Image: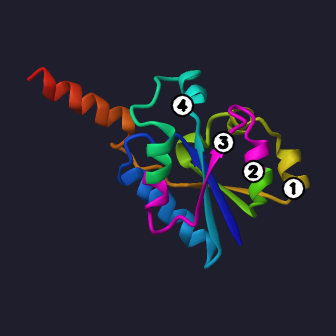
């Protein structure tokens, strides 16, 4: 079983670790592969990451639940990264469940079906994110 997830993974935190643990559990002894978004791609839809791509990949790779880390070279079109891995399952945080995840990733439900890939939404960790950490830092700077 190969489980794939992707993201920015800036300022690695407990929410990231919980997502990767859930991927590991779903892999049932198989592999967990994580695709990390490039700095330029992230900057195209939100603030540029604090940590560089290399730093973010190293942080993700250090997690005991991760078997491999790749670069999402395709940006908004994640199909090339996904096809390079050939996962059985793509894991996504539940914060995406009510959004158009397929459009965000550049594929359709039919494309997933042809590839025999299942998407599983796992619980999103509330009250922690890279944006929240950045806000905490700024808040403390102004105290």
**Number of the front mark, 4 or 2:** 4
In three-dimensional space, the C-alpha distance between marks 4 and 3, rounded to whole angstroms, equals: 10 Å
Q: Are marks 2 and 1 in contact (CB under 8 Å)?
A: yes
**Which corner quadrant of the image does residue 84 belong to?**
bottom right
Residue occupying image coordinates x 80% and y 52%: 83
Mark 4 or mark 3: whose residue is earlier in sequence: 4
Name the disc covering residue 39, or none.
4
Q: Is residue 29 above or below residue 137?
A: below
Q: Tell me, yes or no, whether the highlighted magenta stretch contains residue 77.
A: yes
Q: Quadrant of the N terminus?
A: bottom right
Label 2, secondary structure: give it: helix
- Residue at mark 2: 82
**Number of the front mark, 1 or 3:** 3
In three-dimensional space, the C-alpha distance between marks 4 and 1, rounded to whole angstroms, equals: 28 Å
Mark 4 or mark 1: whose residue is earlier in sequence: 4
Label 3, secondary structure: give it: strand
Tag 1: Cα neighbours inside 10 Å, few (<14), some, or many (≥20)? some
In three-dimensional space, the C-alpha distance between marks 1 and 3, rounded to whole angstroms, equals: 18 Å
**Which corner quadrant of the image does residue 30 belong to?**
bottom right
Mark 2 or mark 1: whose residue is earlier in sequence: 2
- Residue at mark 3: 72
Q: Is residue 50 above or below residue 122?
A: above
Tag 3: Cα neighbours inside 10 Å, few (<14), some, or many (≥20)? many
- Residue at mark 1: 115
**Number of the front mark, 4 or 1:** 4
Residue occupying image coordinates x 38% and y 37%: 130
Residue 4 placement (x, y as % from top left): 65, 57
Q: Are marks 1 and 3 in contact (CB under 8 Å)?
A: no
């Amino acid at each position: 079983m190969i489980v794939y997830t992707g993201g920015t993974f800036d300022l690695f935190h407990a929410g990231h670790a919980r997502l990767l643990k859930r991927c590991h559990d779903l892999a049932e002894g198989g592999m967990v592969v994580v695709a990390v978004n490039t700095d330029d791609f992230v900057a195209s839809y939100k603030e540029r990451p604090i940590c560089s791509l290399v730093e973010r990949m190293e942080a993700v790779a250090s997690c005991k639940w991760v078997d491999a880390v790749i670069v999402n070279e395709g940006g908004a079109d994640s199909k090339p990264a996904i096809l390079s891995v050939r996962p059985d399952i793509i894991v996504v945080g539940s914060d995406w469940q009510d959004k158009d995840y397929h459009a965000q990733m550049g594929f359709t439900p039919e494309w997933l079906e042809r590839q025999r890939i299942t998407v599983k939404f796992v619980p999103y960790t509330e009250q922690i994110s890279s944006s929240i950490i950045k806000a905490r830092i700024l808040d403390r700077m102004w105290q």
